[in-house]
Image: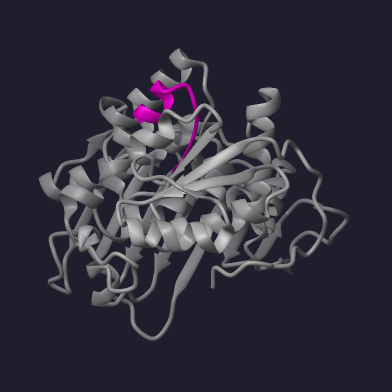
Amino acid sequence: MFGLGRKRQAPRPVVDASINIVVVGLGGMGQRNCAHVYDSPSFTLYGVQDVNQSVSASVADKYKVRSYSDFDALLSDEAVDAVFVCTPHFLLAAYGMRVLGSGKHLILEKPMAIDVEDANALLAESERAGRHIAINYARVHTPVIRRARELLDSGVVGEAETIDIRWSSHKSAGYYQGAHSPTPDDWRANKEKSGGGMLIMTTCHAIHYAQYLVGMRPLTAAANALNTGGIGDVEDVLQGVISYENGVIGSVSTSSSQRGSSTNDMVIAGSQGTLVIEGDSLRFFSTRVIDGQRPGKWHAEKHEASERYLDDWLDEVANSISTGAKPIAEPSLARDTLALIQALYDSSQTGRTIQIGSIV
């Protein structure tokens, strides 16, 4: 799964391969990210680090790079330009603050932190230190989301009225208990360490790119959540209602206990049409002429399904570090995504509708 020598589907321009980066946290996501960084023309995988020294040594040997004995050792290495932190959620913010404080650029796995206060501190420290920060919400670079943004910008739905997200699948007990990790740990089942269950673990991607697509700020959130599987103290089912600017209403439905099939779709409906995103496919209906296509009919498109979007995101991050260019989704959008997630959780626990502005 994380082998060397993956073939890119098309050549990409080299941005600046002199950016030396170390990947920290070598669980499943960390090792996947190592493979993409190693193949990137924009970065040099300079080293790796994990609390499990045998895992760190094994991954370092695989890529013929350095294995750092501890986090302080890599922070003191002046040859390191950037650090990609892929630790469990509860360590992301603390590690990130130390990276920025050492004068290095920071790349973080989502969700960047488990509370908005820490997310704000990271953004402020990035500004103070003059170092770049990026959060791995790379799905904004998938072909289907890029195309959806084009269609929305062209007015396919007119004025948005509703935004509905459904993201469900089946996560085994082993997923929450770390059975598939090289260093088993049940942090995913512990709300204090993970921040929550399916919503913050996976559905956060859809919440992030929904805000990217429509460009509207969520105002309030109300939700109910359940732990149906009895694993830890995190939710495996959540249903929420969201109000956005301009009177737009949204919903989110997510579950990690849906057996037999997976659901990953989003429906954005408006005054002139409807856009439906289903995995790597989309459909749209519009009363307007879009791309020369006949109005008043459904049009379907299938887009590439691959991890190429991670490579494109890494190129964008490297370009931002090298030139100061802005990414297509600002780091603050990751903070706003976390604020909405936190509001949904707060509502599910208190039974009240939460004003998101009180969190940010």
155 relative position to 125: left or right: right
Q: Is residue 172 visible?
A: yes
Indicate whether 243 appears above or below 169: above
Of 49 and 306, nearer the camera is 49
**Residue at (34% x, 33% y) in the render:** 72
- Magenta part of the chain: 97-108
Return the residue found at the far bottom. 260
Q: Is residue 103 magenta?
A: yes
Q: Quadrant of the N terminus?
A: bottom right
Q: Quadrant of residue 180?
A: bottom left
Q: Quadrant of residue 17?
A: top right
Q: Is residue 6 magenta?
A: no
Return the residue found at the far right. 292
Indicate whether 40 appears above or below 73: below
325 relative position to 352: left or right: right
Coloring basis for residues? one colour
Q: Is residue 328 visible?
A: no
Indicate whether 168 appears above or below 129: below
Return the residue found at the far top. 128
Q: Report x, y in % for residue 193.
A: 20, 49
**Residue at (39% x, 86% y) in the render:** 260
Indicate whether 299 appears above or below 249: below
Q: Report x, y in % for residue 207.
A: 44, 49
